[in-house]
Image: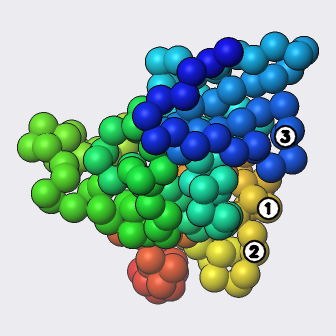
Amino acid sequence: MIENLENEIWKVVKDFEDYQVSSLGRIKSFKYGKEKLLNENNSPYYIVGKYIHILVYESFSDDKVRDGECIHHKNEDPTDNRFENLEKMTLKKHTILHHSRKLVSDSTRKKMSRVQTGKTNSNHKLNELEVINIKTLLKEGFDYKYIHYLYPQVSASTIWDIKNKRSWSHVKIWNIILKEKE
């Protein structure tokens, strides 16, 4: 039998009665009639379709993590899945938190500033006219997955990046009007 750690509370994982999750981020399996600790090294293990930190949060808060939300480790240690170390927040807030100047090292900031997107990326697979067409389709309400079907040479995430101005932001739809007049 697995010994409880100090102040450890166990709960059955919803919809998976063969598993228990603890308030300290440990997971037990009772499959095949044997009790087994699954994450002895406290890794961000993926089990029953979720990461451990999400299982812990949802089990001990009775709150679900929805689309556009995530679970943040307050002490920045992704292996510390104690319930008291977990906090639900929007993906936007989480991204801002992790990419604000105070949480990004100088070396990481340098690397981020060197990232090249769009035409400045020597591996680009689109030209400006194709990007204008993609932006026009997006403006007309076409889904980025459908546009990816039309432009299979790039990933759906590239189309998403164009839509959200993370890539090819220098290309504007009105560029085509100026080019036609020239």
Residue 63 percent coordinates (x, y)? 65, 67
Q: In the image shown, does 34 or 156 lie closer to the viewer? A: 34
Mark 2 nearby-residue class (10 Å; few <14, some 14–19, many ≥20): few
Q: How far apart are marks 1 and 3 (CA)?
A: 36 Å
Residue 19 visible to the viewer: yes
Is 109 placed left or right of 159 in the picture?
left
SS of the residue at dot 3?
Answer: strand
Question: Residue furthest toward the right?
Answer: 32
Residue 132 percent coordinates (x, y)? 55, 70
Q: Distance between the residues labelled 2 and 1?
A: 7 Å
Q: Mark 2 is on which residue type?
A: Phe
Circle 2 residue? 142
SS of the residue at dot 2?
Answer: loop
Position of the N terminus, as image quadrant, is: top right
Q: In the image shown, does 96 or 163 lie closer to the viewer? A: 96
Q: Which residue is drawn at 43% across and 34% down?
A: 6
Q: Residue at x 54, y 28 (%)?
A: 4
Q: Distance between the residues labelled 3 and 2?
A: 39 Å
Residue 55 percent coordinates (x, y)? 64, 46
Circle 1 residue? 146
Callout in the foreground (1, 3): 3
Q: In the image shown, does 150 or 9 lie closer to the viewer? A: 9
Q: Earlier in the sequence, mark 3 or mark 2?
A: 3
Is 75 placed left or right of 148 in the picture?
left
Q: Residue at x 47, y 29 (%)?
A: 5
Circle 3 residue? 16
Is 167 placed left or right of 180 in the picture?
left
